[in-house]
Amino acid sequence: MALTGALVLTAAVLFPLAAPAAGGCRFTLADQSDWAARTGFYMDLETTPTRASAYCKWKHMIIAVGVADGSRWRFIIARPKWKLDRDYTAKAVIGAARIELYLDGRRVGRIAGGFAGLLDRDLLANSVPSWAAGACNYVLTQNSVRAVSSGGAAVAETFTAAARPVPLMLLAPASNSRSVPFHYAASASLTVTAVFRLSAASSDPKSYAPYVDTYGQSIHASFPGKIQTDSDLRSAAAEEKIKLAAWGVPGGYDAWGGAVNASWRDAATGFFHVLRHNDIWWLISPAGNPCFYIGLDTGPLTIGNNTPTSGREWEFAALPPQSAPYSSAWSSGDWGNEGIASVSFDAWNMIRKYGSEAWRTIAANLAVQRMKAWGFSGFGKWSSDAGSLPILPVLEGRGVPLLVRHADIFDPRVQALLRASLRQQMQARINDPLILGWSYGSEYGEIVTPDEIAGILGMGGTVPAKRALVDAALSEIYGNKLAAMAAAWGVTAASAADLYRASPKPPAADIEALREYFADRYYGFLYQTVKGIDPNHLYFGSWIVPGWWVNSSDWQLIAAHVDVIGYDRYAPAFEDALLRRLAKSTGKPLFLGEFSFPSSYGLLRGYQAYPSVNARDDAGAGAQYRSTLEAAAGNPWCVGAAWFEYRDEPVSGRGSPGETDRRLVTGEAYAFGIVDVADRPKYDLVEQVRSTNLAMVQRRLALTK
């Protein structure tokens, strides 16, 4: 069997900024691993702050190699006497008999072998995990990487790190990345070599302040088109007006993106629905026309795109006044940060660009005009009202208590609360044809986990979910043989009531069976509740991510309780063997709710590098967009896709739920957007997006000819 992977290479610069609660800094030289599955390997540089300092120090840095054989991890850890301003060569030799680590040709560690490679994961190089990017007093630059298998497969790349000042590295701790195919046999041994450089930097981020200018741009960045004055904002608006007039509004579509020139149509129900026509799944617009829906997430205004300012005001050269009209750029309590002030540079720029009185109306109307001119069907997830364009709302369990990770849908009281919450969010739009459909929650947050089931089983005997799980195990796993179940769970029980009160330790197979039981009932309750409130609209589920789950049964469990399988996937290509297998196994229509290829050019503007997928520049992002959309439109199950997202995130981060720290970058800070912080389209991207969008319905219609 062949082991196939793509070697992701980056000319990376590290000045870590943000760390998890445990602290620490990590720079990945090479990584092709699945930690939970105990497979693959990694080689990295790690530092943990001492008790005397909040910063990671280069003198304490270790180099580590971790290798897994499918059952456990083994590690080599070395702490050399590092020297500044010089290159180092690290080499990991990974085989069945032994694992060795060399630094500058000298062996620094050796352990017994054992290696199980990955079949479905890229090899990542020059990566700074967001959970281990603490403040430190050094800079790392990776210059090259080479990977060789015992079978002769090899790839080698050399990189020139972008010349960026340290403060810019602080905001954006990695550089231009790309993927290079690297194929080798599953039984092969590997030699992976990385060259990197260690240099000093100040350990106090404030020494480089301020970082962000009055327009929300990195002060230390230099790039074409950087906004210098308010007149630059207004000039950009005038330029766009000319472009939009030249593009006009494309013909051949109804108000919802349906093709009016198709050779066939379906009944006009007044709502979106799905239809399988000649073995091809289609969305059907409310007018009855076939539609390959192309969306854009998080539009059209600035919801959720603020950056926290409390306690780190020193980071900003200027902040807007808190009086009218600029007060609308401010908010408090975003993302659950009660009392934490935050500001939207997007809003501040649009106030200056479009005028203090009408900026919201102008920006919203302009967003709709852009979407139509650019060939989008409408907005996607996380979007606010968008005039005459459809949206795809994400529902939440507002005010509904959680048992562990999810609500106790076996409890009638909780069921009533959840129904009421959903009804309140939905009731105003149950007859609205601009609702593409409903969804609930997002990604891994809606996956039921084994730990969650174990936690429920450890609760008291009056908890409805626990009683339901015990009853299910007794009847469906043990055939109502109480003694057998009690023995297997390590408890003493003469009745079901004894099992309710017990704190059992079920075997893993039972936990998995009960996990799937709980998930099936949970997803089923959500589907039935949403459809009971609103039978008119489609239900897209909870945006499952292929591979980011407990196991593949999660796809099947969610698919059983949706009209369309909504999923997110950030990957170099639209489809791989896993997605094809999943699609075929369920046969239901699919909708790609999030995909993106943020440009590495954003690093030169102060944005962080997205670790899993990216493009060299905006034109490259447009080319990858075209490739993904063409593949999606050619897929018989996919009925639409949505790019993440409308606007770039703030260079200083958009925060995260519950975050109250004072880090330089807090939360995500990626250049995902199709427009920038100055509300300017990225034309190198937009031009290709537009031409791609306008060709996709006809591409899909051609499948049925």
Image (cartoon, rainbow, N blue to C red):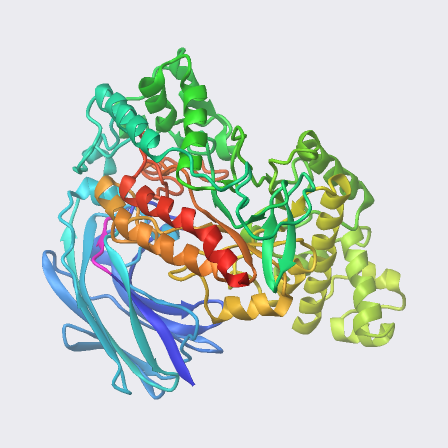
In screen coordinates, is 698 left or right of 497?
Answer: left
Residue placed farthest to the right in the image?
495
Q: Nearer the viewer, residue 323 or 288?
A: 288
Q: In which quadrant will I find the N terminus?
A: bottom left
Q: Is residue 619 above or below residue 560?
A: above
Q: Is residue 410 above or below residue 354?
A: below
Inspect this view and state whether residue 492 appears.
Answer: no
Q: Residue at x 71, y 70 (%)?
A: 510
For residue 195, what is the image quadrant?
A: bottom left
Q: Residue at x 45, y 68 (%)?
A: 576
Q: Nearer the viewer, residue 697 or 359?
A: 697
Q: Position of residue 571 (x, y in %)?
A: 41, 59
Q: Position of residue 245 (x, y in %)?
A: 34, 29
Inspect this view and state whether residue 403 appears.
Answer: yes
Q: Which residues are magenta?
A: 10-15
For residue 357, what is the image quadrant?
A: top left
Q: Position of residue 144 (x, y in %)?
A: 18, 65
In screen coordinates, is 694 left or right of 228?
Answer: right
Q: Position of residue 315 (x, y in %)?
A: 28, 30
Q: Nearer the viewer, residue 611 or 616?
A: 616
In screen coordinates, is 610 left or right of 591?
Answer: left
